[in-house]
Amino acid sequence: MTENPRPMIDQGHAISFQKVGKRFCRNLKRSLFYGFLDVSRIFAGAPPDTTRLRKDEFWALSDLSFEVR
Amino acid sequence: MQSTDHAVYEPNYRAKATSIQIWSKCLRTICRRKDLLFYLVRRDFLSDFKRSFISAGWVLITPALAVISWLFFNHTNILNPGRLPIPYPAYVLLSTLIWKLFIGIYQSGSNLFFESASFGIDVRFHREVLLAKQIILHVLNLAAGLLIIEAVLVYYGILPTWKMLSFPVTLIPLILMGAGIGLLASVYSVVLPDSKKWLDYGMQLLMFVTPVVYSPQVDNELIREIIRLNPISYLLDWSRSSLTGGSFDHPLGFLLGSIGALAVFLLGLRLLYLAEDKVVEKL
């Protein structure tokens, strides 16, 4: 998170989303295992790739952009 | 209304923070939320007593019940505590009280995500404040239990010495160790639930390889070696000695144990900050 003001964002927006997505995993145990892998990778300083799908994963939302004024 | 202050969230934004930034941010969060912290401590401390018929009496009853069970084991010769510097009831009461602080903070730390699960998914909540609250509550309970301890110690002729002043300082590494292991467990308990069960079992076992209910000078060579390698033995021993006026043995063991405790705590805080978003998704 960058907490410093950024000039490129329109100050009139209450909230602005740019190219956001949400993925889920069909298999609960695999989902937890992915969580374990992701957490371990973040801890080791190698953050996971959030743009690609793994086995049993699907995009519930993808490449979504909108603004609330 | 126009605002010049806003936050920007990017993918993996937390991973970009350095360890120093993470630790100072956690500290600043607790300082900024001190009113919330005070409110939560007050609420939890009083709510325990408000709902109980015996009320504040539990502060004295809990350690008294613990000491009775250990006295029973000792009296029936099931347990051979070894050579002790002070009478067994005083030793076991003091040791279990300190151990309870360590294990209580570990348990609270390891349940950090589950404690805040009801609102933590929807609301951005600072879990470091919850951890600080739990630590303060455990310290308050220990302070209340100390009243009974001091009475027992005086009864056995162990009068307070100047070393008693160092008691709060000697507790710090134990608190850090308990909180650090708890924080590491809290993250992995969500994404790898089996790990917490194993760790909980390991922590129960740890009590029996730490001189809590028996002396460090046991006859069994294997147990003696495990105690020697167990950093918590030294941390516990120094806390106990500060109240009984005993000697501060093995300063190197205490120093290394304290450094280890600090390292585990800082690693735990780092993991909490880095993994929080990912873990909340899995609750």
Image: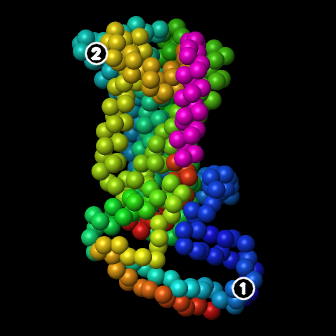
Q: Secondary structure at mark 1?
A: loop
Give the x, y percent position of residue B135: 53, 43
Give the x, y percent position of residue A58: 34, 80
Q: Is residue B273 left or right of residue B53?
A: right
| Residue position for label 1 | A8
Q: Chain of mark 1?
A: A
On the image, which quarter does residue B163 sit in?
top right
Give the x, y percent position of residue B193: 32, 54
> Which amino acid lies under the numbered mark 2 shown in the image of this protein?
Leu
Q: Is residue B278 above or below residue B233?
A: below
Are discs 2 and 1 both within one chain? no
Q: Is residue A17 above or below residue B281?
A: below
Tell me where the magenta segment starts and ends, as one range: B245-267
Magenta segment main secondary structure? helix
Q: Secondary structure at mark 2?
A: loop
In front: B86, or A31?
A: A31
Find residue B79 and name its label: 2
Q: Is residue B275 above or below residue B98?
A: below
Residue B179 at least partly seen: no
In front: A62, or B78?
A: A62
Q: Is residue B275 above or below residue B140?
A: below
Q: Quadrant of the N terminus of chain B?
A: bottom right
